[in-house]
Image (spheres, rainbow, N blue to C red):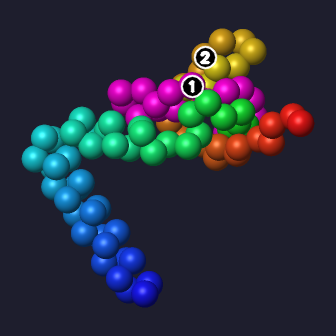
Amino acid sequence: MRTDLLIAWLSRFQRLSALSERAGDIAPVRPMIVERVSTIGQQVRVHLPGEERVMGTAARVEEDGALTVETAQGPRSFYAGDVVHLRRDT
């Protein structure tokens, strides 16, 4: 069962990778990636090097791959960092 799942995943990855390689960038597969990003619209905390923490709402994935977070101080884009989904207030 796990082997079948891995084979299916690798086959899908190979097709997406080939599309990207032929184009020379991720443009052909970007919409499929962004569509599956469950972080968009979520309250998040981004952990950055040096203990910096940024909180806000994950707004979008930029063309260059950065995650833009709407913070109290305005939008900030991140290329690297640990993104933690925060619980919604109930």
Q: Residues within 10 Å of mark 2 (few under 14, many from 20)?
A: few
Residue at x-position 29% and y-position 62%: 13
> The disc labelled 1 sits on which kind of residue?
Ala
Q: Residues within 10 Å of mark 1 (few under 14, many from 20)?
A: some
Highlighted range, magenta: 48-67
Which of labels 1 and 2 is toward the front? 1
CA distance separating discs 1 and 2: 9 Å
Outermost residue to the front:
90
Q: Is residue 79 above or below residue 72?
A: below
Q: Is residue 62 above or below residue 31?
A: above
User: Along the horizontal axis of the image, is 27 left or right of 46?
Assistant: left
Which residue position is annotated with label 1?
A: 59
Labels 1 & 2 near each other (Cβ < 8 A): yes
The quarter of the picture where the C terminus appears is top right
Q: Of residues 35 and 10, which is closer to you in this image?
A: 35
Any part of residue 52 in sight: no
Q: Is residue 63 above or below residue 17?
A: above
Mark 1 lies on a secondary structure that is: strand
Which residue position is annotated with label 2?
A: 75
Q: Earlier in the sequence, mark 1 or mark 2?
A: 1
Query: Is residue 89 on the magenta stretch?
Result: no
User: Along the horizontal axis of the image, is 22 left or right of 10?
Assistant: left
Residue at x-position 59% and y-position 21%: 76
Query: At which x and y percent is residue 78?
Result: 55, 32
Residue at x-position 38% and y-position 86%: 3
